[in-house]
Image (cartoon, rainbow, N blue to C red):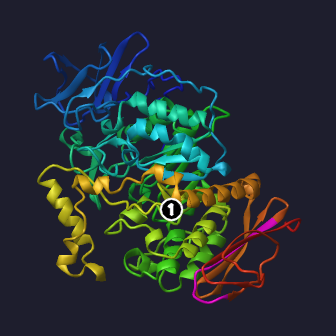
Amino acid sequence: MNIATSTIPTDGAATASPAALRQGAWPTANGEVAFALWAPDAQRVELVFDDGRRQPLAAAADGYFAATIACAAGTRYRYAIDGGEPVPDPASRWQPDGVHGASAVLASDGYRWQHDAWRGRPWADTVFYELHVGACGGYAGLRAQLRTLAALGVTAIELMPLAAFPGRHNWGYDGVLPYAPAAAYGHPDELKALIDEAHGLGLSVFLDVVYNHFGPDGNYIGQYASAFFRQDAPTPWGAAIDFRLAPVQRYFIDNALMWLHEYRFDGLRLDAVHAIVPNAFLDTLREAIAASVPAGRYVHLVLENEANQAGVLERGYSAQWDDDFHNSLHVLLTGENEGYYAGFADAPAQHLARVLGEGFAYQGQADYRGHARGEPSAQLPPHKFVIFAQNHDQIGNRARGDRLITQVSEPALRAALALTALTPMIPLFFMGEPWGSRTPFLFFTDFAPPLDEAVREGRRREFAHFAAFADPQQRATIPDPNALSTFEASIADIGDATHGDGARWRDWFVALMALRRQHLVPALAQARAVGARTLGPKAVAAGWTLGSGEWHVAANFGDTPVALDLPGATVHAENAGDDPAQLPPNAFVARYRAGSAT
């Protein structure tokens, strides 16, 4: 399906498509503001201003209502539908008084960019550092960390979702106003200043966006646009969003364009796209974004997709988060076999070897629930996969938010992180990981009653089938997501990277990044797998063509040495010993063989 979309130019000026109205409040070139709302269930829509004024919106085609009026930046407004209680704008670009409060008109030219020459970085350069803005002190607090982060050797920061959410703190996946950057973190212009400064330091900035659902508190769309949702396709978060409808598609496409052009994000990570139905919307979205990006600018689109749809990647998405890498690696490191780790516990080394050689472990076979999962992926280049030993989910979805560094030995962890960094895929590291932070990352929210109790008890029930929490008394010790202390306990202090063990881990990580830049990045875009295999029950080896030669890695997470027959000269080793034909427990080695690629 082709859908006409608006384009938001880099200079921030709003240009409306002639085919449809763009929802929200957008300043025009002549100093007025264009308001538009899709409300197909409504007979009458009024703008309600905080000073009591009301302005009717004119009915337009396809269920839209619109008006263009003189209005100053900062003006608070709501919509009254058929004379009912006023509600926020679902496309509010600034929500300073909370998700149930008034929306505010935001100027498009309120920030003066300092680094206009920035055009992004090639995908092969990418090393992600995923972070939570609130846990970094908001937009201003994170901005103060940028020089330290750039010095680590990462090239891109990925922000967990920013869409306005209820309360003071939230992971971001309960957002209800996708166009409004969370006011808890600062003003939208502070977000632009953060991105601008990151660009000045050579850092790309990515945003995690949630287009598969809205949070449970603060979404009013169903009151006047019931068709926005479909009742025949339930999701874990309620009724599915109906992506068959052009106005619904338009709502999310324009949102993506706003982040990429007005805020100048360098890319998006699309959350849980397996819950987007029909899935063809992913192609519609990608095509609209591609059409909006000028020649010479790099914009990258990354998916989280439990369905492992290789075809979507072949058609143009930059990459997918590869949970199969993490899951198999985690089982090798910890021996855990509950929850989603059950699908990898049978043969974790074989699963990891398949990931290294072909991208996905699951390529159509049944998972632990008996569901066929995935598509063949061996034809995809390795840079189509984002790999990680940890991320926000894999730490925070644990009952106590504990990190790998508290679960495994230091040699084992170093081997795992070296494998992540020196595999010719795209690596991601989570907030605090480069300096060996032991701070947990817990699941936190800030819901009002009665939702707070429902979330707290629902969270604890999720762990009832885990052996460690079969006892109700043990489940009661799981931290309350709504407690302020839960959020505060999740703040990884970047100051820890300057001294003690933190500085030691940081220096090790910086050296690892330097090796990646030197040996992998120059030829990463052309890298192709040449085979992967197991070396033992908990050991793997894999190789890729790289430039004019070959790159090989091996890792052993078992308790006994394994025989090693790996070509090339050693570039990096962790705990590998002196015998080149043997790999000790908890060891890693990377070797390069020059001039052997065909």
The structure residue drawn at horizontal position 52% and vertical position 46%, both measured from the top left corner, is 157
Residue furthest out toward the front: 500
| Image position, residue 1 (x, y; %) | 48, 44
Left or right placement of residue 253 versus residue 518 in this view: left
Q: In this view, does 157 lie above or below 547?
A: above
Total labels drawn? 1
Can I make out residue 257 in this image? Answer: yes
Taking the spot 59% from the left edge, 27% from the top edge, the residue there is 115
For residue 106: magenta? no
Residue at image x 31%, y 31%? 92
**Quarter location, residue 350:** bottom right
Residue 233 x/y as whole percent: 30, 59
Q: Is residue 136 left or right of residue 480?
A: right
Q: Residue 420's x, y, as percent?
A: 60, 65
Look at 56% across and 56% down and name the residue there: 503
Look at the image and give the residue range highlighted in magenta.
550-561
From the viewer's perspective, is residue 19 above or below residue 343? above
Judge the density around disc 1: few (<14), some (14-19), many (≥20) Cα neighbours within 10 Å.
many
Looking at the picture, tell me which residue is in the foreground, 464 or 580.
580
Task: Say which quadrant the C terminus sits in.
Answer: bottom right
Instruction: Spot the residue most to the right.
Output: 595
- Asked which secondary structure carries label 1, the reply is loop
Q: In this view, does 424 lie to the left or right of 239?
A: right
Image x and y of residue 274, in percent: 42, 60
Rendered position, 45 above or below 422: above
Q: Quadrant of residue 96?
A: top left
Q: Is residue 312 visible?
A: no
Which residue bears the numbered disc 1? 436
